[in-house]
């Protein structure tokens, strides 16, 4: 797993991408209107990732293999890096943004539910972020955690691994087993990988 991207890390988690393997990235079919260069910063998209038509991905963004950004979502990398891990899905209507010094790091096999807002935070592998949740700068969501719908995670709040969190502000209400966490996280993410393959090959505008 990569490091967190927090300011205290000796090496930023995205340093390894300063010379990306371009044979695997940016060779992807997409609309001209959904992925944008911003100045010198161009999104780095794995060839097996997918951005839906009418989503917007711009600037300092990296999407790994099997990652997907769904309809009406915005991923705005105009400050620090936004990294979307392998097999992670960003569902319809989400907003992803970062501030200088607060990159947004989303691990592998993560599900980000519809209309969630992630800002300068770290989401570890296998987490599920519920519909309409908000997670703010410097917060960290531990591996395999489940953040309930419409939960608010304040700045710099750390959620332990395998936690179920609900409320505004969010509080841990239960500790999950690894098996329970996998049902929410990895299995849900795997379903979206299959779905992106279908949409990538079968989605056709109606004339």
Image (spheres, grey):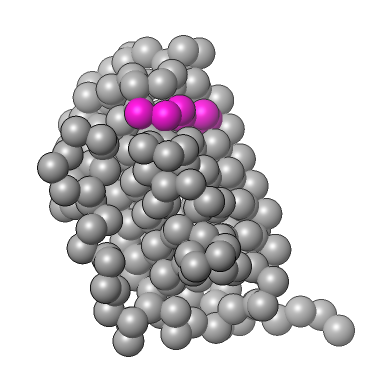
Q: In this view, does 185 lie to the left or right of 89?
A: left
Residue sitting at 40 percent across and 51 percent down? 81
Q: Is residue 86 left or right of residue 111?
A: left
In the image, residue 35 above or below residue 163: below
Q: Is residue 163 left or right of residue 91?
A: left
In the image, residue 43 above or below residue 167: below
Q: Which of 6 and 201 is in front in this view?
A: 6
Give yes or no for residue 13 being in the magenta stretch: no
Q: Residue furthest right?
A: 207
Q: Can residue 146 be seen in this view?
A: no
Q: What stretch is highlighted in magenta?
A: 133-138
Q: Nearer the viewer, residue 109 or 180?
A: 109
Q: Is the magenta stretch mostly helix, strand or loop?
A: loop
Residue sitting at 52 percent across and 45 percent down? 96
Residue sitting at 34 percent across and 22 percent down? 156
Q: Nearer the viewer, residue 20 or 202?
A: 20
Location of the C terminus (image quadrant): bottom right
Across and down, in percent, residue 134 comes to: 51, 29
Across and down, in percent, residue 38 comes to: 57, 63
Q: Which of 99 and 50 is in front in this view?
A: 99
Q: Is residue 111 left or right of residue 59?
A: left
Across and down, in percent, residue 199 comes to: 57, 73
Across and down, in percent, residue 109 comes to: 32, 53
In the image, residue 114 above or below residue 191: above
Give yes or no for residue 137 being in the magenta stretch: yes
Residue sitting at 19 percent across and 52 percent down? 2
Q: In which quarter of the image is residue 37?
A: bottom right
């Amino acid at each position: 797993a990569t490091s967190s991207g927090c300011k205290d890390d000796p090496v930023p988690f995205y340093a390894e991408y300063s010379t990306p393997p371009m044979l695997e990235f940016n060779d992807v079919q997409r609309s001209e209107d959904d992925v944008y260069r911003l100045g010198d910063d161009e999104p780095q998209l794995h060839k097996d990732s997918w951005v839906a038509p009418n989503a917007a991905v711009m600037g300092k963004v990296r999407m790994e293999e099997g990652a997907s950004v769904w309809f009406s979502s915005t991923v705005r990398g105009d400050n620090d890096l936004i990294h979307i891990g392998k097999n992670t899905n960003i569902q319809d209507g989400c907003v992803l943004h970062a501030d200088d010094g607060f990159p947004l790091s989303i691990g592998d096999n993560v599900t980000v539910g519809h209309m969630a807002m992630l800002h300068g935070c770290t989401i570890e592998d296998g987490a599920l972020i519920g519909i309409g949740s908000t997670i703010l700068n410097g917060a960290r969501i531990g591996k395999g955690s489940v953040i309930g719908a419409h939960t608010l995670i304040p700045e710099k709040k750390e959620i332990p691994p395998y936690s179920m969190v609900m409320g505004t502000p969010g509080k841990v209400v239960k500790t999950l087993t690894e098996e329970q966490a996998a049902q929410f996280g990895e299995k849900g993410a795997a379903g979206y990988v299959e779905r992106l393959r279908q949409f990538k090959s079968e989605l056709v505008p109606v004339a």
